[in-house]
Amino acid sequence: MPRLVLASFVAVLALTAAPGVAPAQAAAAAPRIAIINSREILQRTPGYAAAESTYMKEVEGFRTEVQKLQQQLDSAVQALDQQSIALSPAARQTKQRELQAMQQRMEQRTNELQDRARQREQELLQPIQVRVNSVIQGIRAELNYALILDADAAGGLIAAADPSLNITARVLQRLQQSQ
């Protein structure tokens, strides 16, 4: 992806700095570029707040379950510590194996719940993301943009940009209209 962005910028620079090309010709041939703030768009898209609320409630249930498992494990460890002196070496080893098995079950359940949380987040957000992407693609085609960059993208490729290139408000307006 960074190569695509870099290549696009190089193409823009080449078109605008080409020797023998009049500035008006270079401007006419230069691809149009716009910027969006995807995080802002997503957070302000109709339906996002409800999806986020649902997700947070479900994740809180997962956290509660993991905390209960951790408390059970902690209690079992404390019990073993208190009984340790009175236990025979064989009984102590058996109890330690039981604790290890309990720890493994807790880790496995925690991983399962994390996977379910990721899957649920995807289920809740995918329809919203599809709608947002559809609107962005529509605006891109309608206004003949060659490239729309995300100012919120990981890696922070945009250090500074002309605010007039930002079409976030237009995307949000279109999302409100399509509701």
Image (cartoon, rainbow, N blue to C red):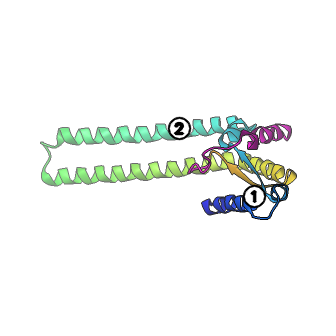
Residue flagged by tag 2: what amino acid is it? Gly
Q: Where residue 87 is drawn, which disc sits there? A: none
Q: Is residue 97 left or right of residue 21?
A: left
Depth order, front residue of 80/49: 49
Is 125 magenta? The answer is no
Image quarter hosting the N terminus: bottom right
User: In screen coordinates, is 45 left or right of 3?
Assistant: right
- Amino acid carrying mark 1 in the image: Thr
Q: Which residue lies at the image location 69% right of the left edge and 51% below the top edge?
A: 149
Q: Is residue 54 left or right of residue 143?
A: left
Magenta region: 153-179
* Sequence-wise first label, 1 or 2: 1
As drawn, 133 above or below 45 = below
* Distance from Cα at disc 1 to Cα at disc 2: 56 Å
- Judge from the rendering whether residue 168 lies leftward or rightward of residue 88; answer left or right: right
Residue 66 % position (x, y): 44, 41
Q: Residue at x 69, y 41 (%)?
A: 42
Q: Residues within 10 Å of mark 1 (few under 14, many from 20)?
A: some
Q: Residue 176 lies in magenta, yes or no? A: yes
| Residue pointed to by mark 2 | 61
- Residue position for label 1: 16
